[in-house]
Image: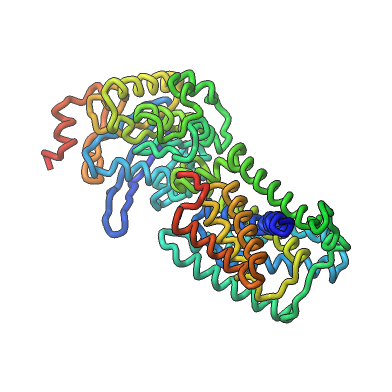
């Protein structure tokens, strides 16, 4: 019995990480209808950047995270303004192709610089510290911190979109780019802000991912898949939905692993498929 | 002498190969209400799209208070002080009424218009301020669209067919509200298919026909016969 409780709790904690993966993807898709195929590779890039700072430059993980945040925002703004804005239009194919190309570039760049070896960001002890709840049941402090961050990020995004002038501008531009222009909104700038924000989330997710597990340059596509599944399960237009999607995916995988060590990912994909068939718009989609 | 608020000189516009405007000269002086009339496809909406930056134009073809603004992107032109109430209202569907109004103030131009001012002009909007924009009736949606444009505190307000699809009583209310706004000195251009309404609310009018100006003059002095000929192009 305690084993199942453990599987459920560990699944929720894993789901916190998936939610962090998914929030950035959800944000970019929600505002620009842009599916960023390089999303997973950018997460791994952030993991390696965190590794280089934390282990290579010796800053430790928290300073590295602090430094990567603004850097990621600037990189996201530049990426959108310089490259991705040019791909947006009636045709949905150009952004897919360009971000797919970006994904390959990032993977090969990481291989070139860091080799194919797996690594992990040294966390100074937090990666193994845990909170014992009962005999045979303990929750890791790091996964708890990740889940709390995911909750905070989701609440922050909902607040930003629902209550601030920037959020209104983002929703209006997503609704009707031309009319937003009439209001004085420069869509290119607003899109770039959205991607900057998305890459800050990617940086946070990447550093946590590198702390929690091992990372290798070709891990990106798998993270993209989890993020994508979480977004689709949760439904578009709601960050709380994305968070729920991440948690559902985490629990499904964790319970699957408990059933049979070979079934974890399969059960996760299975739940995704069931949701896709039963409710193609996702569980918590906000109608637009 | 102060330059006109809006002056176009030989403004042309085309959608791909199809030319829609052939040299439009329009002048709107400060404080004036000008009507632009014409049948479907005469180029009225195209003219507004060219003025607001959605169609390419040489800089000197559109002057706003003397400054060349032709071909600038829409968000710059909006920030300079031209607000458009677009045809079909185009409220943001995922935003509430109040959020739509607040977006009108996005550029942060200083001026008399605030949420309270818009709600005083259109009291029914205040009762529905939290409602999603698409749930409003057509008349209320048009009030919200006008209010949203006023929130920008524009120097020039352009209205594209605000009477379209609305009941006559509602149209009268909307234009009465607009008259209260223009009494305070706002410069307005209304595009209107209904000639009687256009004459009633404006001091001067331009009639467009097949992308050209077929008639221009003081609204009170033009005879119905003159307007009918210019409107339908009978003498061409």
Q: Looking at the picture, how far across and down is residue A152, in whole percent?
A: 70, 46
**B175 w.r.t. A14: above or below:** above
- Which residue is rendered at x = 66% and y = 43% of the image? A155
Residue B98 shown left or right of residue B209 in the figure: right
Image-quadrant location for residue A256: bottom right
Q: Looking at the picture, how far across and down is residue A134, in whole percent?
A: 82, 53
Tell me, yes or no, if residue A226 can be seen here. Answer: yes
Residue situated in front as seen by the camera: A88 or A42: A42
Residue situated in front as seen by the camera: A71 or B5: A71
Q: How is the image coloured?
A: rainbow
- Which residue is rendered at x = 84% and y = 54% of the image? A132
Q: Looking at the picture, how far across and down is residue A41, in whole percent?
A: 64, 69
- Which residue is rendered at x = 38% and y = 38% of the image? B86
**A50 w.r.t. B191: above or below:** below
Image-quadrant location for residue A219: bottom right
Residue A163 shown left or right of residue B10 in the figure: right
Residue B45 shown left or right of residue A17 in the figure: left
- Which residue is rendered at x = 39% and y = 27% of the image? B140
Specify the quadrant that holds the C terminus of chain B.
top left
Residue situated in front as seen by the camera: A21 or B183: A21
Marks counted in the figure total 0
Q: Looking at the picture, how far across and down is residue B16, in whole percent?
A: 31, 58
Residue B13 shown left or right of residue A231 in the figure: left
Q: Residue furthest front?
A: A1
Tell me, yes or no, if residue A204 can be seen here. Answer: no
Residue situated in front as seen by the camera: A256 or B73: A256
């Amino acid at each position: 019995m305690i084993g199942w409780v453990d599987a459920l709790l560990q699944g929720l904690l894993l789901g916190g990480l998936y939610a962090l993966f998914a929030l950035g993807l959800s944000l970019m898709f929600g505002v620009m209808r842009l599916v960023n195929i390089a999303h997973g590779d950018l997460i791994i890039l952030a993991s390696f950047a965190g590794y280089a700072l934390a282990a290579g430059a010796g800053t430790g993980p928290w300073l590295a995270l602090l430094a990567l945040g603004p850097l990621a925002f600037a990189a996201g703004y530049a990426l959108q303004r310089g490259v991705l804005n040019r791909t947006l239009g009636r045709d949905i194919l150009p952004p897919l192709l360009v971000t797919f190309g970006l994904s390959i570039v990032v993977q090969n760049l990481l291989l070139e610089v860091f080799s194919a070896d797996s690594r992990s960001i040294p966390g100074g002890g937090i990666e193994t510290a845990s909170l014992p709840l009962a005999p045979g049941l303990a929750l890791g402090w790091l996964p708890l911190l990740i889940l709390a961050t995911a909750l905070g990020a989701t609440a922050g995004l909902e607040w930003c979109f629902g209550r601030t002038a920037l959020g209104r501008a983002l929703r209006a531009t997503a609704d009707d780019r031309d009319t937003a222009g009439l209001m004085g909104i420069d869509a290119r700038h607003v899109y770039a802000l959205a991607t900057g924000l998305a890459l800050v989330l990617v940086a946070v997710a990447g550093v946590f991912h590198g702390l929690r597990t091992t990372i290798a340059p070709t891990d990106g596509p798998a993270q993209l898949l989890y993020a994508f599944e979480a977004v689709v399960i949760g439904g578009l237009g709601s960050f709380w939905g994305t968070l729920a999607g991440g948690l559902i995916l985490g629990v499904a995988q964790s319970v699957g692993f408990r059933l049979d060590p070979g079934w974890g990912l399969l059960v996760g994909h299975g739940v995704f498929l069931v949701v896709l068939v039963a409710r193609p718009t996702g569980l918590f989609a906000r109608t637009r | 002498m102060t330059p006109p608020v809006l002056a176009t000189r030989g403004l042309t516009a085309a959608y791909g190969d199809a030319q829609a405007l052939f040299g439009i000269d329009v002048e709107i002086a400060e404080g004036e209400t000008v009507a632009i009339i014409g049948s479907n496809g005469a180029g009225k909406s195209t003219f507004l799209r060219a003025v607001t930056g959605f169609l390419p134009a040489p800089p000197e073809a559109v002057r706003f208070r003397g400054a060349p603004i032709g071909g600038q992107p829409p968000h710059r032109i909006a920030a300079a002080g031209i607000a458009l109430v677009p045809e079909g209202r185009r409220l943001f569907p995922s935003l509430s009424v109040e959020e739509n109004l607040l977006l009108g103030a996005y550029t942060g131009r200083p001026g008399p218009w605030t949420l309270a001012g818009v709600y005083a002009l259109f009291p029914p909007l205040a009762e529905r301020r939290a409602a999603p924009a698409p749930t409003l009736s057509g008349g209320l949606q048009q009030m919200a669209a006008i209010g949203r444009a006023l929130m920008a505190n524009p120097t020039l307000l352009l209205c594209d067919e605000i009477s379209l699809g609305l009941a006559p009583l509602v149209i009268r209310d909307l234009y009465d509200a607009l008259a209260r706004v223009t009494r305070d000195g706002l410069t307005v251009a209304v595009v209107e298919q209904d000639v009687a309404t256009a004459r009633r609310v404006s001091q001067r009018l331009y009639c467009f026909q097949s992308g050209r100006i077929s008639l221009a003059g003081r609204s009170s002095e033009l005879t119905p016969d003159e307007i009918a000929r210019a409107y339908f192009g009978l003498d061409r």
